Image (cartoon, rainbow, N blue to C red):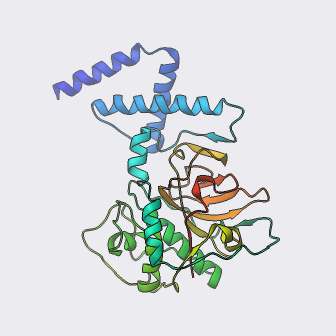
Amino acid sequence: MKSAVILLIGLLSAVAYLNKEENDSYTEFQRWKIEYGKSYTGQQEVFRFFNFQINRNKVYKHNSDPNKTYFMRMNQFSDLSQEEFSLIYLTHDISEDVMEQNQITDEIQNTQENDKTINSVDWRKITQVKDQGQCAGCWAFGAVGAAEAWFYVKNKTTVILSEQQLIDCDTQSFGCNGGYQNLALKYIANHGLNDARVYPYTQKQSAYCKYDSGPYKTNGAQGVSSNNFKSFLTEYPLLVVVDATNWQFYGGGVFKDCNRSVNHAVLAVGFDENDNWFVKNSWGISWGEKGFITLAPGNTCGITSYAYRAI
């Protein structure tokens, strides 16, 4: 108790000696903690404020550059370093894993893209944005998103399905430590999913599988080649794997600051007349454009490299 009091006095003394910019940052940090329900003890307060300052300066510098095509915004990740963010919310570069697991997915589409005259398509409103929290379960959210979209397009009904079932029961993946989104689609076809109200999300892997089957089954999983990507996207949202390393503070606009090493599963949900891609994420509605990101045309962030759809 005594050491905690001494540490608190030291922190308050340090705040008293902050310059105006640092003091403004500390005031903003306190407001941010209230907004996101954050609280820290001991040295964590100092460490999180340090990260907050670095991130605040990064956002300000980025937004001051008139050549940027997107803007950044402080959000729920503002107390995390880049390394922490990647460790908690992303996986390692899974491109080699995906290539290996593609052998288990139904035939990959390699025909030339159909000549379609559709200039834009927008699936953003058909299913809700979810929040995976501090569980590296993007593979499950992406697969469930693809299945929910399939049910909507096929039956014109909105269903909210259980990611938790995949995290607990899909033995070919690793729960909150990453997994195979294409094999998750196969699981949904073979076992079926439950409604999310029946098997609710807990942000962690349970000690046992509660229900290994459910009433919501698709017919299978199919890989989609880059040649056919846009054509198939006019029919259904597509499960894709991307490089999300620099997505931490995305706030809006057309994003293109990435490479093609992939570490995050998301749902491609359309494109506009300029061929920018609409992507649904699983970090809640306070991130990005109410939970979505717009990617520049082409294979930005590797979006067309590893794509799948429910069938």
Q: Which residue is painted at 35% across and 28% down in the image?
A: 46
Q: Nearer the viewer, residue 270 or 227?
A: 227
Residue 216: percent from left, percent from top? 48, 84
Residue 251 versus residue 184 in the image, above or below: above
**Residue extending furthest right?**
117
Q: Is residue 148 left or right of residue 126?
A: left
Q: Is any atom of residue 42 visible in this view?
A: yes
Q: Is residue 21 left or right of residue 299?
A: left
Residue 12: percent from left, percent from top? 34, 20
Q: Nearer the viewer, residue 271 or 198?
A: 271
Q: Which residue is painted at 41% across and 13% down in the image?
A: 17
Q: Nearer the viewer, residue 270 or 5?
A: 270
Q: Which residue is painted at 68% across and 51% down in the image?
A: 296
Residue 191 placement: quadrant: bottom left
Q: Which residue is painted at 68% across and 56% down in the image?
A: 298
Q: Is residue 253 left or right of residue 159?
A: right
Could you tell me which quadrant the N terminus lies in? top left
Q: Is any atom of residue 194 visible in this view?
A: no
